[in-house]
Image (cartoon, helix red, strand yellow):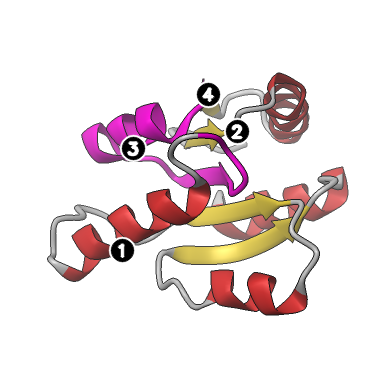
C-alpha cells in the first residue's frame, strides 16, 4: 500500500500511544512508528529525522504540547526545518477558544479531540500518508 511513511507519537499516556499504534497499523502495517512519552524526547526525534506525521498530545507534564509547538514554529520561521510542518494535535481540551488557538500554529495540520476515533485518524492518514 504505502511505503516509507514514518509517524512520531508524542503522548504521556501509554494507553493512548498503544491505541494510536494499533489504529495506524490497522490502516497500514508498513508505517514505521516512533513513540515517546514526553515532548522533550519528541523534539529530539522531530529535529533529527523526518516524519510524515507527528501526533502530538497537548496536556503533558514538564514540556507540554504548546511548548513543543512554539519551539517547532520558531525553527520553522527561522528556516531550520528541512520539511514542511506535519503535526496533528490530539487533545482532550474541550474549550472552543483553546482549540481554535491550536489551529493558528502554521505547523499544525489538524486538531483531533480525544477520545481518538479510529475512522477520524484513518481519514487523516489517508489524507497525509498517500
Element marked by disc 1 = helix
Closer to the camera: disc 1 or disc 4? 1
Q: Could you give the CA–CA distance between mark 1 and mark 2, rounded to whole angstroms? A: 19 Å
Q: Which is nearer the N-term, disc 2 or disc 3?
A: 2
Q: Dot 4, how many residues are within 10 Å of its Cα: few (below 14), some (14-19), or many (20+)?
A: many
**Is-magenta flag for residue 104?**
no
Which disc, if any, is residue 73?
A: 1
User: Which residue bears the numbered disc 3?
Assistant: 43
Q: Which is nearer the N-term, disc 1 or disc 3?
A: 3
| Magenta residues, start to end | 35-61
Q: Dot 1, how many residues are within 10 Å of its Cα: few (below 14), some (14-19), or many (20+)?
A: some
Is the residue under label 2 in contact with that under label 1 (CB below 8 Å)?
A: no
Is the residue under label 4 in contact with that under label 3 (CB below 8 Å)?
A: no
Q: Residue at x 84, y 43 (%)?
A: 118
Closer to the camera: disc 2 or disc 4? 2
User: Which residue bears the numbered disc 4?
Assistant: 35
Amino acid at each position: 500500500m504505502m511505503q516509507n511513511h514514518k509517524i512520531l507519537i508524542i503522548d504521556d499516556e501509554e494507553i493512548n500511544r498503544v491505541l494510536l499504534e494499533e489504529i495506524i497499523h490497522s490502516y497500514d502495517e508498513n508505517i514505521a512508528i516512533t513513540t515517546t512519552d514526553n515532548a522533550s524526547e519528541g523534539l529530539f526525534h522531530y529535529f533529527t529525522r523526518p516524519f510524515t506525521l507527528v501526533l502530538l498530545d497537548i496536556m503533558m507534564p514538564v514540556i507540554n504540547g504548546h511548548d513543543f509547538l512554539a519551539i517547532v514554529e520558531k525553527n520553522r520561521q527561522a528556516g531550520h526545518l528541512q520539511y514542511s510542518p506535519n503535526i496533528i494535535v490530539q487533545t482532550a481540551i474541550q474549550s472552543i477558544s483553546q482549540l481554535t488557538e491550536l489551529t493558528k500554529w502554521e505547523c499544525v495540520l489538524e486538531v483531533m479531540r480525544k477520545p481518538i476515533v479510529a475512522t477520524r485518524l484513518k481519514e487523516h492518514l489517508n489524507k497525509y500518508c498517500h
